[in-house]
Amino acid sequence: MKEIEKKLQFRNIKPTSMRLLVYKVLKKKQKAISLYEIEQEFDNVDRSTIFRTLKTFQTKYLIHSVDDGTGAVKYALCDDDCTCSLNDLHVHFLCNKCGQTFCFKEVPVPIPKLPEDFSFESANFVVKGICSTCK
Ligand SMILES: [Zn+2]
Ligand SMILES: [Zn+2]
């Protein structure tokens, strides 16, 4: 079995050809990319089909989404042991020059101390600056 099919099955996702293609695009980019950017990689695929595929991936923790403030939600692959829990939250970096969003998986999101009776569920931590390529 191919590597990508294994990845999908590991997350209990049936490896249809569409899903394999979307996964390949995310893998190739190595960054967080928007639905629009994924769509550009296909010739004739309905946007809603790609969107549904991304939603499936997301509920199975194969990918996570990032709101980097650019107005478009971006998606990136999760690590194999990721369950998108508090411990898996990491910092994202938006380059002000090229507009690319990077996953800093080795940089955990700082969890703030909250007032009593408030419980933490998720966080979106985006650092903005200039990436190493644009520097
Ligand atoms: Zn850049
Ligand atoms: Zn990420």
Image (cartoon, rainbow, N blue to C red):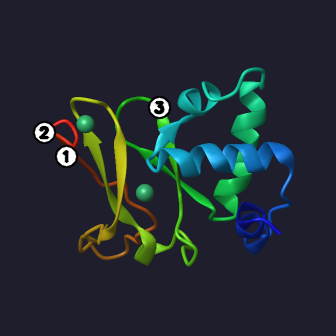
Side of 123 where 112 appears, left or right? left
The residue beneath circle 1 is 132
Query: Farthest residue toward the front?
Result: 2
Q: Which is closer to the viewer, label 2 or label 3? A: 2
The residue beneath circle 3 is 72
Q: Which percent across, then down, holds residue 134?
A: 19, 36
- Considering the numbered disc 3 on the image, is that residue within a helix, a strand or a loop? loop
Of the 4 image quadrants, the one containing the N terminus is bottom right
Label 1 and label 2: CA atoms lie apart by 5 Å
Picture layout, residue 89 above or below residue 135: below
Q: Who's the residue at 61% across and 43% down the image? A: 25
Q: Which is closer to the viewer, label 3 or label 1? A: 1
**Mark 3 is on which residue type?**
Ala
Q: Nearer the viewer, residue 11 or 117?
A: 11
Q: Is disc 2 in contact with disc 3, using a CB cutoff of under 8 Å?
A: no
User: Does the numbered disc 2 mark a residue whose Cβ is under 8 Å from ligand 1?
Assistant: yes
Q: Who's the residue at 37% across and 70% down the image? A: 118
Residue 50's image quarter?
top right
Quadrant of the displayed image that contains ligand 2: bottom left
- Considering the numbered disc 1 on the image, is that residue within a helix, a strand or a loop? loop
Mark 3 or mark 1, earlier in chain: 3
Q: Nearer the viewer, residue 28 or 105?
A: 28
Q: Who's the residue at 40% across and 67% down the image? A: 89
User: Does the numbered disc 1 mark a residue whose Cβ is under 8 Å from ligand 1?
Assistant: yes
Q: Which mark is residue 135?
A: 2
Label 3 and label 1: CA atoms lie apart by 23 Å
